[in-house]
Image (cartoon, rainbow, N blue to C red):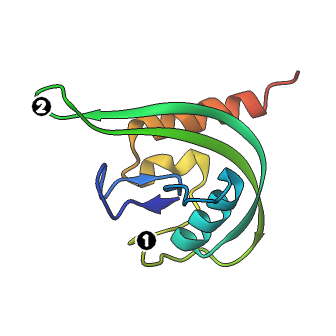
Amino acid sequence: MSERGKPPSEGKWGLPGGAVEVGETIEEAIVREILEETRVTVRPIRLITFLDSIHRDDDGRVRYHYVLFEYLCEYISGEVSPSSDAPNAKWVEYNELDSVDIMPSTKKFILKVLKQENTPT
């Protein structure tokens, strides 16, 4: 997990991510963003889900609207440490999510995915 260094949700902990650069595939962006935020190299395995993240101001106007693509990734290499994109980064066990100031929606998402991944098909 990494601590957000910029709005929205600056100072909150969440899953690493960011904008896709022009000409970059989603999978390339995942690898780059995780490396930039945590210094860890991963390989995207599969898309878990996608969702809208809409942040409004006090008057109800949309300030930010992101479409988030959440991927399951395989760890390849690297020691987790923060970089210029994230003031802090570390591995957080699912049963220790309350040890960081995690965004409630992110915690709910992580627990939902873990439950789905551990449910026999």
Res 76 → quadrant: bottom right
Q: Residues within 10 Å of mark 1 (few under 14, many from 20)?
A: many
Q: Which mark is residue 58?
A: 2
Question: Which residue: 70% across, 36% down?
Answer: 48
In the rendered image, the vertical position of residue 107 relative to residue 17, given as above or below: above
Q: How many marks?
A: 2
Identify which amino acid the numbered label 1 is placed on.
Asp
Q: Residues within 10 Å of mark 2 (few under 14, many from 20)?
A: few
Q: Earlier in the sequence, mark 2 or mark 1?
A: 2
Question: Which residue: 30% across, 35% down?
Answer: 55
Q: CA distance from mark 2 to mark 1?
A: 28 Å
Question: Which residue: 44% across, 47% down?
Answer: 98
Q: Name the quarter where the C terminus is drawn.
A: top right
Indicate the position of residue 66 as horizontal and vertical percent values. 43, 40
Identify which amino acid the numbered label 2 is placed on.
Asp
Q: Which residue is mark 1?
A: 85
Between residues 2 and 35, which one lies in front from this camera angle? 35
